[in-house]
């Protein structure tokens, strides 16, 4: 039976080969027929129209015509699809003839197509009248052994090449540790050290040689990292466990190890950076156990040399360079904090902090101005870290050698000034606003820290207002250069200073300089530039706040016992300045266009001051001068924009009448006027409202109705409340005058009705 199956398989292979050959011949014959038909058509196109060939049959295999159609089509399956057959069929194979398909001329794709074994992808083409052959994929592709793996094998390759190499190095390292644990109890200290270093160096050397020969093999790369780690641990174990040498020798050996790691495998390799930085950070962490202050300077030397070596080794790659800048600064910061807590009060620590401060200052200047020279703009982002290092080193130096707070203020001011100068230079050359905005942000924050520290520790310098001079210079520079960024920064400085002063007792000199700075910004934005309505509003509000603060500093000692009088004398200057802004038409630009936002802001400020002044009138100590001044100021605030209200819509005219009526009533009540006097005055005011309501220029029906209703209220008050039979001249005169006024109202309405108003 085995031979029969082999014969069946060979027969199937022969049939497949024959079918492939037949398919190629048919395809060639079909191509020749097509070319022939094309040539004939082109030759007869300009003479006698040739009849196009008509294909009335659809074939699965090209090259068959009605005249050359095969009488039979063998049907079989390849060996891998065949069902078991008996011996007789295998010994005497007979072709099967499909007479019905031949007689009825069925499409041959049902006959010949079934005889083609389904092994390789074969296109099926359909011939129709006047149509070009179309190809369709027949079978899914198969892959031969040894062919290239598809995309799904990528993870397999990565695991096999990279991850397994890492696992191998870890297992080897663990095996060495276990092996050492078995033999160490039977060996001496010297042999242990020699053996530890020998194995580590041998492993490193072997892996390095193989890594150079086959750099694409990640196994040797991982083994090299393992060797470097073993060498590093050998140094630490020899110092910490065996105590074979002191800390100074340990850091010298670690420095040599750093040089080997950075430069032997090849400068700039990512593996070297990872291993070198890991050893760098661990070595600095070991400084927490330092007990001898004499080792601070050698340790600092190790840190500075290692930081410089790492930075040099990874300078040319941008990502590695930026990572190394951050690592170096973090290492120096950690070292500073460690010695600040343990050995901070020693003279050696003072020298160490002084060197760190100088080193950080150089880095700070480089990062700020490197973009101006030849470096990239990303250096801006690391300047705040260097500034923070300067501040930490200065604090540590102060712990070692106590100093006055004024020195710290000077350091903060210098950091801020240098940053501001760099910002000015870089802004003129930098088109990208992102690093510029970042610089403005952290420099402004540095200014805020300086202000707060000065306010707490050196209040005399804060009260002098010197920082406002700096802010004024920045604002003037921004105005000249037309840089809103600097003007915003100057305003932020001024506002933060003002807020700090509001928290404590107002100093006259400080408040005066603050108002001068605010008024400078107000004049510049409103009358010199006059472009932005938002800036006009903001600077106007800021100037009013500083003016109120200055008024508080002036009158605080005079009106210590009367809060209402103090409040009144604070709002009077604010109201005058706001009134001047309204009179000068601050809401108009140079072209005469009005800004509704500015006008609304001025009206809101005026309304708030009016409410405060009305409240103050009832709480003053009734001093004649102060009371009269309060009433006059309140009336002035009420009359400030009445003309504009009367010239506007009917609703605003009604608002003006109500506002003036409230002010008159409040003034009468503040003077404790008699009821009948209040009624007469309010009736007179109602008549004025009616007359103005009939005016052609300012008239409004709403204002007339308001005056009429107010007069009716006054008459009702006379009859219901004010009437008294006490024989007093005042009562009699008041009723007489009120009656005359009521006749006057009637006469007014009759007059305007006759004139057909």
Image (cartoon, grey):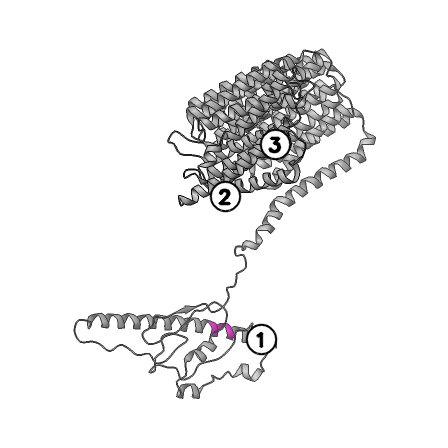
Say which label, 1 or 2, has the lower sequence index: 1
Residue under the point 76% across and 22% down: 289
Depth check: give the residue in front, 575 or 162.
575
- Which residue bears the numbered disc 1? 5
- Which residue bears the numbered disc 3? 732
Q: Which mark is residue 702?
A: 2
Depth check: give the residue in front, 421 or 461.
461
Q: Quadrant of the C terminus?
A: top left
Residue under the point 55% across and 16% down: 513
> Residue 30's image quarter?
bottom left
The span picked out in magenta is 11-16
Say which label, 2 or 3, has the lower sequence index: 2
Cα distance between the residues tagged 1 and 2: 116 Å
Label 1 crowding class (10 Å Cα cut-off): few <14, some 14-19, many 20+? some
Relative image position of residue 625 (x, y in whole percent): 60, 18
* Image height of 294 relative to 39, above or below: above
Q: Is residue 745 visible?
A: yes
Q: Secondary structure at mark 2?
A: helix
Q: Of all residues shown, which one is farthest toward the right?
A: 185
Q: Quadrant of the N terminus?
A: bottom right
Q: Nearer the viewer, mark 1 or mark 2?
A: 2
Cα distance between the residues tagged 1 and 3: 144 Å
Label 2 crowding class (10 Å Cα cut-off): few <14, some 14-19, many 20+? some
């Amino acid at each position: 039976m085995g031979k029969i199956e082999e014969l069946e398989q060979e027969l199937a292979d022969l049939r497949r080969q024959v079918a492939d050959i037949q398919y190629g011949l048919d395809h060639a014959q079909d191509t020749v027929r097509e070319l022939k038909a094309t040539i004939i058509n082109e030759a007869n196109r300009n003479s006698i129209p040739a009849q196009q060939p008509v294909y009335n049959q659809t074939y699965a295999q090209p090259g068959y015509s009605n005249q050359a159609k095969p009488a039979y089509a063998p049907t079989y399956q390849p060996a891998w699809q065949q069902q078991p057959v008996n011996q007789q069929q295998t010994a005497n194979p007979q072709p099967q003839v499909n007479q019905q398909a031949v007689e009825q001329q069925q499409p041959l794709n049902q006959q010949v197509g079934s005889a083609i074994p389904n092994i390789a992808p074969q296109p099926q083409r359909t011939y129709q009248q006047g149509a070009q052959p179309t190809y369709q994929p027949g079978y899914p592709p198969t892959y031969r052994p040894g062919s290239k793996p598809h995309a799904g094998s990528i993870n397999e390759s990565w695991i096999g090449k990279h991850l397994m190499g890492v696992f191998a190095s870890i297992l080897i390292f663990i095996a060495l540790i276990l092996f050492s644990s078995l033999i160490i109890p039977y060996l001496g200290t010297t042999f242990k050290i020699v053996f530890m270093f020998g194995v580590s160096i041998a492993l490193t050397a072997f892996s390095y040689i193989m890594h150079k020969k086959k750099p694409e093999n990640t196994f040797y790369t991982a083994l090299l990292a393992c060797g470097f780690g073993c060498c590093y641990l050998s140094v630490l174990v020899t110092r910490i466990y065996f105590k074979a040498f002191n800390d100074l020798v340990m850091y010298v050996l670690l420095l040599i190890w750093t040089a080997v790691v950075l430069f032997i495998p090849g400068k700039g390799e990512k593996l070297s950076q990872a291993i070198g930085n890991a050893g760098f950070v661990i070595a600095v962490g070991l400084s927490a156990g330092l007990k001898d202050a004499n080792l601070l300077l050698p340790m600092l030397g190790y840190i500075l040399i290692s930081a410089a070596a790492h930075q040099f080794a990874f300078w040319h790659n941008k990502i590695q360079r930026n990572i190394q800048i951050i690592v170096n600064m973090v290492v120096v910061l950690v070292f500073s904090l460690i010695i600040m807590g343990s050995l901070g009060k020693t003279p050696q620590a003072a020298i160490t902090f002084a060197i760190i401060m100088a080193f950080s200052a150089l880095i700070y200047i480089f990062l700020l101005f490197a973009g101006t020279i030849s470096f990239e703009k990303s250096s801006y982002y690391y300047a705040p870290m260097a500034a923070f290092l300067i501040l930490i080193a200065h604090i540590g130096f102060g712990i070692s050698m106590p100093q006055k707070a004024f020195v710290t203020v000077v350091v903060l001011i210098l950091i801020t000034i240098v940053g501001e100068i760099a910002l000015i230079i870089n802004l003129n050359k930098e088109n990208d606003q992102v690093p510029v905005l970042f610089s403005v942000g952290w420099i402004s924050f540095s200014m805020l820290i300086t202000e707060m520290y000065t306010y707490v520790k050196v209040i005399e310098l804060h009260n002098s207002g010197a920082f406002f001079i700096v802010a004024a210079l920045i604002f003037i520079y921004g105005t000249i250069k037309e840089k809103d960024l600097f003007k915003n920064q100057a305003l932020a400085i001024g506002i933060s200073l003002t807020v700090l002063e509001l928290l404590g007792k107002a100093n006259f000199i400080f408040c005066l300089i603050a108002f001068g700075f605010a008024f400078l910004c107000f004049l510049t934005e409103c009358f010199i530039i006059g472009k932005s309505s938002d800036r006009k509003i903001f600077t106007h509000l800021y100037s009013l706040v500083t003016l109120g603060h200055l008024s508080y500093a002036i009158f605080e000692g005079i009106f210590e016992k009367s809060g209402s009088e103090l409040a009144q004398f604070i709002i009077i200057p604010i109201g005058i300045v706001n009134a001047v802004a309204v009179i000068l038409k601050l809401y108009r630009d140079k072209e005469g266009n009005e800004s509704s936002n500015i006008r609304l802001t001025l009206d809101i400020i005026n309304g708030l001051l009016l409410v405060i002044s009305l409240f103050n009138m009832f709480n003053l100590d009734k001093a004649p001068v102060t009371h009269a001044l309060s009433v006059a100021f309140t009336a002035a605030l009420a009359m400030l924009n009445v003309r504009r209200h009367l010239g506007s819509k009917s609703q605003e005219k009604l608002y003006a009448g109500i506002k003036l009526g409230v002010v008159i009533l409040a003034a009468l009540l503040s003077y404790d006027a008699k009821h009948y006097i209040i009624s007469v005055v309010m009736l007179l005011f109602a008549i004025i409202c009616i007359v103005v309501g009939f005016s052609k220029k300012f008239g409004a029906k709403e204002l007339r109705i308001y005056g009429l209703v107010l007069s009716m209220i006054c008459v009702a008050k006379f009859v219901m409340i004010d009437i008294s039979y006490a024989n007093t001249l005042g009562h009699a005169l008041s009723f007489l005058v009120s009656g005359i006024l009521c006749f006057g109202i009637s006469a007014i309405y009759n007059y305007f009705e006759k004139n057909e108003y």
